[in-house]
Image (cartoon, rainbow, N blue to C red):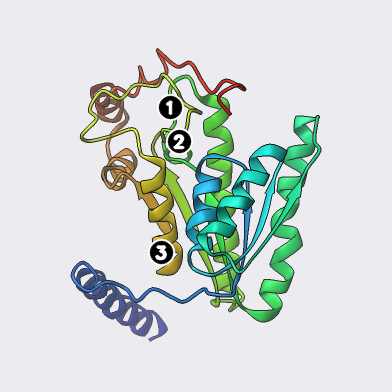
Amino acid sequence: MNFFLETIQVLLLSMWYSVESFIHLFVPIKRKNIAGEVVLITGAGSGIGRLMAQEFAALGTVLVLWDINQEGMKETARLAKQSGASRVHYYLCDCSDKNEVYRVADQTYKAFLPAMIANNYGHLVSIASSAGLIGVNGLADYCASKFAAVGFAESVGLELLATGKDGIKTTIVCPYFINTGMFDGCQTKWPRLLPILDPDFVAKKIIDAVLTDQVYLLLPRSMYLIAALKNILPMKQGIMLGQYLGAFNLMDTFRGHSRKQE
């Protein structure tokens, strides 16, 4: 009897969730008000971190910014104040050892999650990459770190739901290459299908995802289809599709982000 009832429940809820998703194609989800909320941004000294700080500042938040780039942090704080942040605090990590950077970053969830759990309130945002969903030729170490970021964020989100802490939301961001300089020289075979993304566009999409409690944000939208095909196509077809999309040659002209550019 339990099997029958639970199966009926799953079928009915699945139908409702499908209808709900269809409705939201035409009726936007109401954006939540985060004025006065505390927003912590790691890696805020440049790139997407800086742009997100400006976007969140315009919403009247209290910003807490963290990075290892002292000059970059000062500029981000200045821009955030100009954009309307109610308060801005920033912290620098004098980390000459790369392992120290990773250690500090690893402590972020541990530092803030207990208070979130106690209040059943908050929002965790993991900036990962499409390289955390699909392996890329020439980016083995980068893909490994991004697959870890996606898996970690998914697991934490599910643990929170399993313990009834549904007031804590999770957003996992997986963009294609972004034009911030980090991947200078990378090429895309079909720019209309897989464009090199504009940083301002990505930052605005991340803010929208947070304000509407969107769990997964893949950019561009074609990544939803590509990620789905990866999981259902036979291996030979998947490799053929990857070759067609130019995935085997993305890094052929890679130059990277010079320290001077930063």
Q: Position of residue 41 (x, y in %)?
A: 61, 54
First along the sequence among labels 3 and 1 = 1
Nearer to the camera, 144 or 125: 125
**Residue 131: which disc?**
2
Q: Residue at x 51, y 53 (%)?
A: 52
First along the sequence among labels 1 and 2 = 2
Q: Nearer the viewer, mark 3 or mark 1?
A: 3
Q: Nearer the viewer, mark 3 or mark 2?
A: 3
Q: Are marks 1 and 2 in contact (CB under 8 Å)?
A: yes
Q: Residue at x 39, y 54 (%)?
A: 204
Type of amino acid under label 2 = Ala
Measure how far apart labels 1 and 2 are at the Cα level: 6 Å
Measure how far apart labels 3 and 2 are at the Cα level: 20 Å
Q: Are marks 3 and 2 in contact (CB under 8 Å)?
A: no
First along the sequence among labels 3 and 2 = 2
Type of amino acid under label 3 = Gln
Residue at disc 3, secondary structure: loop
Q: Residues within 10 Å of mark 1 (few under 14, many from 20)?
A: some
The quadrant of the picture occupied by the C terminus is: top right
The quadrant of the picture occupied by the N terminus is: bottom left
Residue at disc 1, secondary structure: loop
Q: Residues within 10 Å of mark 2 (few under 14, many from 20)?
A: many
**Residue 136: which disc?**
1
Residue 134 seen by the camera? yes
